[in-house]
Amino acid sequence: MKQINGTAFNIESDILGRITLKGKSIFNRKDEILVKADAKDLPSGYAALITNSENISGGKPCVGNVQTLDDFNEGDVVLINKRGEIVFLYEIRSMHNAIFATERCNHRCIMCPQPPVAEEEDKTPFNLKLISLIDKNTVEVGITGGEPTLIGDKLFDLIKQIQKYQPKAGISLLTNGVKFADKSYAMKLAMCKHHDLQIDVPIFSDIADEHNRIVGAKTFYKTVQGLYNLALFHQRIGPRIVVHKQTYKRLPQLADYIYHNFPFVSQVAFLQMETTGNADTNLDELWIDPYDYNEELKQAVLLLANRGICTRVYNAQLCVLPYEIRKFAVNAISDWKDTYLPECEGCKLRQQCGGLFASNQKHHSAHIKPELKYTPMPPPVDGNTTISPFLEKYLTEELLIQCNNPIIYDVPCGYGRHLQWLAKKGYEVHGIDLDAKALNFVEEWKEQHGMKRVFISKEDIDRLKIQSCCDIMLNIHLYSKEILKVLSQMVKFNGLFVIETPEIHGGNYLELPVQGEVGEYLKSQRYELMIYEESVPQKGHVSVKAIARKLA
């Protein structure tokens, strides 16, 4: 949980309270913790004071010398203690708030980020008060642990307390599902009649012994029975799969198992592993670069999604995921755990990307790299266009004539230097780009020169779905695997695909293909490599110049 430290004054036991920055009426202060800059003393009635001041007078509870008052928001709920620690239990601006029902658990999962304790005091009275302090307009609350069902029927007290104090909130209950093998317990959950409750249940293999080995208990069939009992009472269920070295190989089989055996589930989520707790202890047995299980993950996600089951991918970095399943990615990392790497600076996907766990900064995919915003080359000056020397040398008139009056696509076309060059030769040319300024320049040039065989459109290249539309495809100075795949499908049989990636300079090698990547992909798509040149590799990456013919 998010934590801020200061210096405690006059605090003998833990104080739970709701943050106020504005102050409250004297009649409504007893559960409020006042946050105030440069305060010396606590006004009457408040539970405690938090301030940046170092000199505190009076004998009232206070945490002083706090340098980060900007981190507090009206309505946050915190716990302060005699060590001067301020622990955020609820953040009003966060979508990832949860109640920790217990730290005990009847599983010993090999990758558990929060290893359980054997004994503890009952947290329920504390949690009931915590829920009473949470903002009434909260839209979602999690209940987690440990294993929440180990508190027995008190779990239903928590649910009813949320119904009372946060009537609009949905609840996500994270449980191993074992307790719900008891049909009467499942029935009691249903009798809470919560309007928006989802029970998220981890399942790690379609093979019972494998699942049991990973969770450290022989409970696979109890979990399965629990799912059926919950379904019997029409409860929403969301299986969750943490992906690591011991689970990734059978992801497609597990997805198929879920589809055939639990067709009633409302959602299935695949989670990238958090490398803390038991996961860190057992890292050698568990760690695999997420990039290396992309194929299995893609198969599993698409198998479920194509059969109408809501599917999600949690905790994954968009630049690492295959393009086909990026739309299933959801930012599910709690705000206080979430971070980005220096490599993420300037990435066009950052606003949509969930980042990664702070604990994963040492152990993360080697394939995290920015997908940079495309900036077209500047417009031609006084109508003088500088053509790629590679195109001038190899895309000869003889080759163009062999294509029999070809339809040519230039993607991305930028300000149209190659588009203009080919249009002046009399060919039908289509330019696609996202840059409105560049396209306006091309449109003006087209009108000025009466070029009726020039067509332009504003499109996101990654999302093009046109197939077999052109005789020649030009892809000059913008590369990604997704773009290569999309554009290769737009070329007709016997058509030409002309590729020239940017040259290697500085650190831009991260934007370029690895050695052999382009050639191998084109061959896999039945392209004949007529001309293929790769630069000297830099850290395994190369620039490429190629002309390939698509075979029938």
Image (cartoon, grey):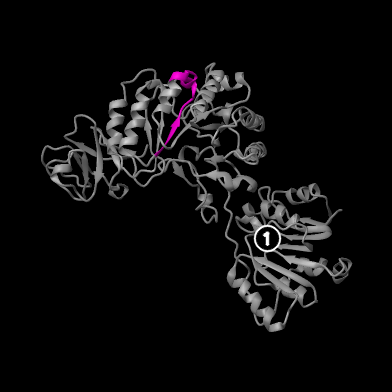
Callout 1 crowding tier (Cα within 10 Å): few <14, some 14–19, many ≥20: some
Where residue 388 sits, quadrant-wise, is: bottom right
- Type of the residue with mark 1: Pro
Residue 92 in the figure: left or right of residue 493: left
Judge whether residue 548 can be spotted in this image. Answer: no
Above or below — where is 44 with respect to 456? Answer: above
Which x, y percent locates residue 273?
53, 34
Q: Name the residue under label 1.
A: 502
User: In the drawing, does residue 187 fall left or right of residue 319?
Assistant: left
**Residue toward you, 211 or 413:** 211
Left or right: where 345 falls relative to 145: right
Q: In percent of the image, x 68 and y 60: which residue is there?
A: 503
Residue extending farthest to the top is: 218
Q: Where is residue 14 in the image (x, y as percent from the top left)?
A: 24, 31
How far across and down, in percent of the image, does residue 360 sit? 50, 38
Give 245 or 254, whichever is nearer the viewer.
Answer: 254
Residue nearer the viewer, 232 or 207: 232
Where, quadrant-wise, is the N terminus in this rendering? top left
Q: In this view, does 323 lie to the left or right of 71?
A: right
Q: Which is more toward the observer, 4 or 165?
A: 165
From this viewpoint, is residue 213 visible?
yes
Is 400 inside the magenta-drawn segment? no
User: Which stretch is magenta?
Assistant: 170-184
Q: Position of residue 190 (x, y in %)?
A: 43, 28
